[in-house]
Image (spheres, rainbow, N blue to C red):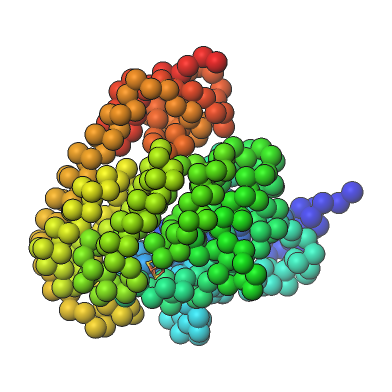
Amino acid sequence: METVQDLTNLIVRESADWQSPPRYYTWTVGCQMNKADTERLESALSQMGFLATTTASDADVIVLNSCVVRQSAEDKVVGTITSLKPLKKAKPTTVLAVMGCMVGPNQQSQLQKTFPYVDVFMQPQQYKPLLDLLGNKLDMDWEGCVGTLAPINPEVTTYVPIIHGCDEMCSFCIIPYKRGREVSRTIDDIVNEIEHLVLRGVREVTLLGQTVDAYGNDFQNKTDLADLLEAVNEISGIDRIRFLTSHPNYMSKRIIDAVASLPKVCEHINIPIQAGSDRVLEQMRRPYTVQKYLSIIDTIRSTIPSVSLSTDIIVGFPGETRTDFEGTLDVLKKVGFDKVHTAAYSPRPGTIASRKLPDDVSKEEKQDRKHLLEDIQQTINSKINETYNGNQYEVLVEGHERGHWKGRTRTDKIVFFDSTAELLGELVTVNIQSTGPWSLKGSLVQN
Ligand code: SF4
């Protein structure tokens, strides 16, 4: 019986435009959401009979998945598109596609003028224009042969987008302009994808969204993230569930209770505060106070005593005084986060902050604040991690790094250990023997 691959080969031989079988190349910058989007497009291309290649010059279809969250990322994308112009000129049959955050709503025609040699521009998750183009070229009804868009070669731990877009309007952020309003996927659709992932060796899923705890707010019924966690917890073959990134406004008691009660949901919550000053939070258009944030943390801690917490912080936001910044350091010391992602503010063209708020904290001061915060956090990390010393933890083995097995605890701590056994994807017990601020080391406990 002929497979899709056979049919694709036959069509390509007849058209003689492309290799047989045709090859695709993908290039991705940006966040986990972009990586997840690329994996889903690759799944569609694979189901249409394309093979992956690791070099752009060897590809019949080149897809660049862009990020413009920072100017430096956008510059990198523009540089990469431009670098492909000679290749496209030399081989005009190559299809060149650009997707992701660079392609905001109603921006295609402007981009087409700037980069006339690009064949197709697609907004995040909107793969159809490219698949239509390829389907036409191959004379193939792609909708008839492309099923569930689960990654083809997923890692043991894999990201699954559950809500696209963002309804918030943080003044420093470009994402709502690029990714549009929140749209949640249905529970059935997500469960179906995760069941496919289990068959491909996945043991842990991280449910992804810009505001993941707002999952379901766009549904008519009352479905929320707690319902979804319950449904994923029922999938046999999945050992662990995480979710990322939460917004303080949507972190409900129902979600916290679900984390506490569902055995597969890991005790780790990432909940960005961004600043420890109410005045700065207001300028950032983050609709909560420091007090409200701390009370959410109290609820999380009292409901899930073993929880680990991480957060995101921006230093040097317009108008942030030294006193405001010290408020941020106070929050750090009070909460004792397990991990903090720190960024020095830089204005992003197109955002409210870049239009309305003067970037009045000097570069040097921003760097000073960032380094001071990172130093304090490193000490906190070291102290928290020391409490793991001498104890045994369940670790999901994710792969090899620097000659050791590497995995993570349920609380998201990176653990290294040695063993000659084949352990990829296994849940093992590790006795922790030394700790540092960023990782733990231990020995395998033989069960
Ligand atoms: S919640 Fe704020 S920072 Fe996060 S994606 Fe939405 S607008 Fe951007």
Q: At which x and y percent is residue 301? A: 38, 46
Residue 73 picture quarter: bottom left
Q: At which x and y percent is residue 172? A: 31, 72
Q: Residue at x 21, y 47 (%)?
A: 333
Does 254 sit left or right of 332 as displayed? right
In the image, 105 versus 169, the foreground residue is 169
Relative to 110, is 342 above or below? above
In the image, 419 versus 337, the foreground residue is 337
In the image, 401 versus 80, the foreground residue is 401
Q: Residue at x 51, y 32 (%)?
A: 396
Residue 364 picture quarter: bottom left
Q: At which x and y percent is residue 273? A: 31, 60
Look at the image and tell me whether residue 197 can be seen. Answer: no
Query: Which image quadrant shows ligand 1?
Result: bottom left
Q: At which x and y percent is residue 57? A: 52, 57
Q: Residue furthest top?
A: 446
Q: Residue furthest right?
A: 1
